[in-house]
């Protein structure tokens, strides 16, 4: 190793086509001063979740850097906020399946030798391509081959110094990094392929367990719909049957629909931003279907609602796709969101524009009571999206405008990622009907249960796709 190398940069990624599904990881070690590729690692790891694959990529990248020179400090760059924050010590690692992987990553170097930095997905193309090459190889029944890889040629559009905050450094002559990598591949291939690859010692983790906060994916996969998570009373056979059915469905959907890029979207558009929409759990007002908006008593969850929140948290942990949580400011949503956050090891961000409609004088009243007391106002409200509830509440038009503002802002902030929005009936229905291009009155034809899950994916071309609506299998 040239003595001039003062810092290694490890870029790592992992992916799962189905989550869980066929999975692979990729990692590359760069010379921070020149941007040149020093080593690559990639492997198809069988059926696993996104997070397992990401951690496996991190471990492989750190081991590759350590094999080159254990005395050179390392800067890890990944587009997985979860892995970066957990390995930096800012987020707790609560999921039992992730703890051993994180421990293996931390054990490669002494404390303080490795720093972690989050980068956008578009700056992690090299590792992403390695992971997809590994998954493609696995689909063919093969393992990734360093000699056949083109990830370096395709993935690094700006060879040169690796900037401190993820920006490219001063550009060198085009093709230097690619040419150097090609020469290294040829030399290593002639020497029998002795380079740092995915054949490095493996973590003991089997790679098949689900984990929260996964890489960008299709959110809550339609393939999982109707396959309830095993309850506390489920037999071992039932638990295995459910797991087998879920894996089989995900694999079938992946084979039939997933593009080569493996992220549930067109390779040209990149991964969508996915909102997993969760209506809060029951409150004392929910069974009577009373109007309960942002202008009422702000009730907490009932005992039933708290149990629903726990069940939902378990289902989302098993699916392993949520990377961030954003909640309405109202108590029932914040309590539901916190139950999920505690299970996933994430923080809860509050967004005021996700609050429920202000129902004015109707707050706390049932539909029948409103019809008796304010029949004309109710009729006008049902007929026009511009009409307001009695007493100065919000019209559907006003609610739609603020929900759309929140949507646009969050899509931009969480581009390409999967976010859980914990909110209410009207905001969830509004996001769904806007994605479908349906009129406002369509919301009266949607049934949305307490603690139900829905999902909408937003693509870079402005289109949206409703992936799921009113799923309650996790509550049974």
Image: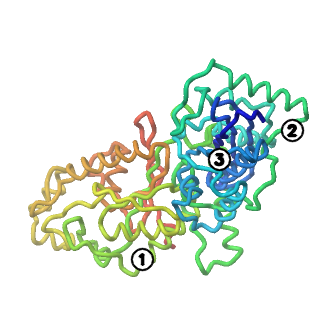
- Residue holding disc 1: 306
Residue at position x 43%, y 58% from top? 325
Q: Quadrant of residue 267?
A: top right
Residue at position x 67%, y 39% from top? 132
Depth check, mark 2 against mark 3: the one in front is 2
Distance between the alpha carbons at the discs numbered 3 and 1: 34 Å
In primary-sequence order, the first of circles 3 and 1 is 3
| Foreground pick, 335 / 171 | 171
| Left or right of 398 in this view: 456 | right
Q: Do residues under tags 3 and 1 come within 8 Å of each other at their CB atoms?
A: no
Q: Do residues under tags 2 and 3 come within 8 Å of each other at their CB atoms?
A: no
Residue at position x 61%, y 21% from top? 172
Residue at position x 34%, y 42% from top? 437
- Residue holding disc 2: 194
- Residue holding disc 3: 14
| Left or right of 291 in this view: 159 | right
- Does residue 337 appear in this view? yes
Q: Horizontal and vertical percent for residue 151?
A: 69, 32
Q: Horizontal and vertical percent for residue 401?
A: 24, 47
Q: Horizontal and vertical percent for residue 292?
A: 24, 69
């Amino acid at each position: 190793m040239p003595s001039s190398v003062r810092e290694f940069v490890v870029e790592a990624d992992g992916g799962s086509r189905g989550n869980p599904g066929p999975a692979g990881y990729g990692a590359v070690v760069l010379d921070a001063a020149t941007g040149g590729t020093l080593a690559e690692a990639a492997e198809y790891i069988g059926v696993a979740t996104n997070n397992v694959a990401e951690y496996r990529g991190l471990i492989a990248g750190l081991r590759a850097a350590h094999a080159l020179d254990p005395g050179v400090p390392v800067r890890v760059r990944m587009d997985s906020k979860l892995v970066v924050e957990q390995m930096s010590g800012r987020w707790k690692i609560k999921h039992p399946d992730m703890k051993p992987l994180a421990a293996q990553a931390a054990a490669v170097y002494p404390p303080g030798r490795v720093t972690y930095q989050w980068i956008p997905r578009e700056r992690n193309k090299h590792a992403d391509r390695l992971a997809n090459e590994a998954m493609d190889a696995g689909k063919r029944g093969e393992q990734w081959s360093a000699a056949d890889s083109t990830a370096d040629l395709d993935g690094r559009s700006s060879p040169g110094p690796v900037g401190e905050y993820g920006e490219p450094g001063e550009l060198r002559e085009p093709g230097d990094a690619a040419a150097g990598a090609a020469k290294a591949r040829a030399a290593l291939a002639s020497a029998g392929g002795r380079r740092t690859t995915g054949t490095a010692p493996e973590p003991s983790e089997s790679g098949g367990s689900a984990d929260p906060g996964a890489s960008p994916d299709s959110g809550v996969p339609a393939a999982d719909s109707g396959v309830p998570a095993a309850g506390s009373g489920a037999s071992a056979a039932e638990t295995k049957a459910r797991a087998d059915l879920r894996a089989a469905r995900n694999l079938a959907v992946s084979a039939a629909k997933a593009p080569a890029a493996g992220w549930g979207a067109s390779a040209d558009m990149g991964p969508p931003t996915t909102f997993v929409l969760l209506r809060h759990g029951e409150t004392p007002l929910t069974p009577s279907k009373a109007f309960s908006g942002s202008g009422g008593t702000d009730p907490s969850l009932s005992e039933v609602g708290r149990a629903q929140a726990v069940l939902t948290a378990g289902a989302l942990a098993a699916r392993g796709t949520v990377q961030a949580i954003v909640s309405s400011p109202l108590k029932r949503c914040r309590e539901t969101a916190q139950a999920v956050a505690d299970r996933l090891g994430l923080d809860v961000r509050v967004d005021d524009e996700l609050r429920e409609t202000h129902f004015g004088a109707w707050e706390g009243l049932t539909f029948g009571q409103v019809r008796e007391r304010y029949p004309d106002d109710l009729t006008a409200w049902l007929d026009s999206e511009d009409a307001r509830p009695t007493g100065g509440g919000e019209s559907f038009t006003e609610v739609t405008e603020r929900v759309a503002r929140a949507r646009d802002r969050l899509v931009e902030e969480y581009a390409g990622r999967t976010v859980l929005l914990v909110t209410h009936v009207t905001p969830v229905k509004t996001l769904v009907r806007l994605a479908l291009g349906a009129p406002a009155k369509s919301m009266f034809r949607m049934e949305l249960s307490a603690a139900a899950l829905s999902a909408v994916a937003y693509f870079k071309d402005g289109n949206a796709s409703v992936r799921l609506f009113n799923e309650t299998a996790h509550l049974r």
